[in-house]
Image (cartoon, grey):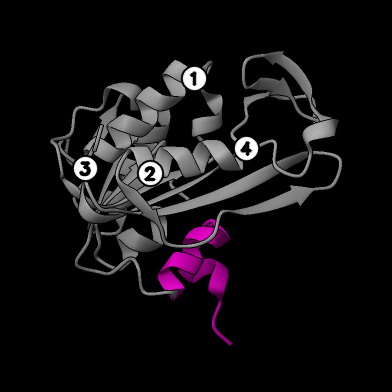
């Protein structure tokens, strides 16, 4: 039997779902935005996908860069950058796929959240795939403790910026996208709700 943990690493199961649906291919140029330890980059790197990574944590970027080098993938300054998602240094329309898993809920307010999303969509080519997984209030509205605006304390004690369905649907339309999958939310008992937002970009930064 194949050792799936060795083959795929700790890839987000929802990113794996996009692979299974054929939406991420070997020929794609992929940005892992907020790459962390590289759990979503690992498999792609082993398959020869042109992977770019950015994170505010320099040690995290260095770790994934070393991982890329070990896979024989590009590991230069062009591919690996340190910086915030609201001020990316990549060119417009550069990527076929943008993956942003468990990062956007660290926004402090609406302005920062929208700035991050707009930057991620700016670097995505028209027709490209945008994948995000982030904390939300969906299904747990009565169980969170509001702080300010959309920031709230979750049942697990963490403070997060929480999106909801109406906000994601509105942003999708405003920025010129089309939902590829229905917005899906997993409610983790007594902890949090995590929502998957998968969009095909039709018009880059519509308005």
The residue where tag 3 is placed is 204
The residue where tag 4 is placed is 135
The residue where tag 1 is placed is 110
Q: In the rendered image, which quarter contains the N terminus? A: bottom right
Q: What residue is drawn where x is 25% and y is 27%?
A: 88
Q: Earlier in the sequence, mark 1 or mark 3?
A: 1
The residue where tag 2 is placed is 173
Relative side of 148 to 23, left or right: right
Is label 3 in a helix, a strand or a loop? loop
Cα separation between marks 4 and 1: 14 Å
Is label 1 in a helix, a strand or a loop? helix
Q: Nearer the viewer, mark 3 or mark 2?
A: 2
CA neighbours of label 1 inside 10 A, class few (<14), some (14 to 19), many (20+): some
Cα separation between marks 4 and 3: 25 Å
Is label 4 in a helix, a strand or a loop? strand
Q: Is residue 57 visible?
A: no
């Amino acid at each position: 039997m194949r050792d799936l943990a060795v083959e795929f690493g700790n890839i987000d199961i929802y990113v794996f779902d996009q692979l299974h649906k054929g939406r991420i291919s070997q020929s794609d140029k992929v940005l892992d935005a907020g790459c962390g330890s590289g759990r979503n980059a690992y498999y792609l790197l082993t398959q020869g996908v042109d992977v770019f990574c950015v994170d505010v944590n320099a040690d995290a970027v260095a770790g994934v860069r070393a991982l890329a080098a070990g896979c024989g993938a590009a590991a230069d300054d062009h591919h690996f950058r340190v910086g915030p998602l609201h001020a990316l240094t990549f060119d417009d329309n550069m990527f076929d796929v943008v993956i942003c898993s468990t990062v956007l809920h660290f926004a402090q307010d609406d302005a920062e959240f929208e700035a991050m999303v707009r930057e991620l969509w700016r670097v995505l080519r028209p027709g490209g795939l945008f994948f995000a997984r982030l904390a939300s209030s969906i299904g747990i509205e009565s169980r969170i403790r509001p702080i300010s605006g959309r920031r709230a304390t979750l049942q697990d004690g963490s403070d997060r910026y929480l999106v909801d369905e109406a906000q994601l649907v509105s942003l999708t339309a405003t920025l010129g996208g089309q939902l590829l999958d229905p917005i899906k939310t997993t409610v983790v008992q007594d902890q949090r709700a995590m929502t998957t937002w998968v969009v095909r970009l039709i018009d880059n930064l519509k308005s």
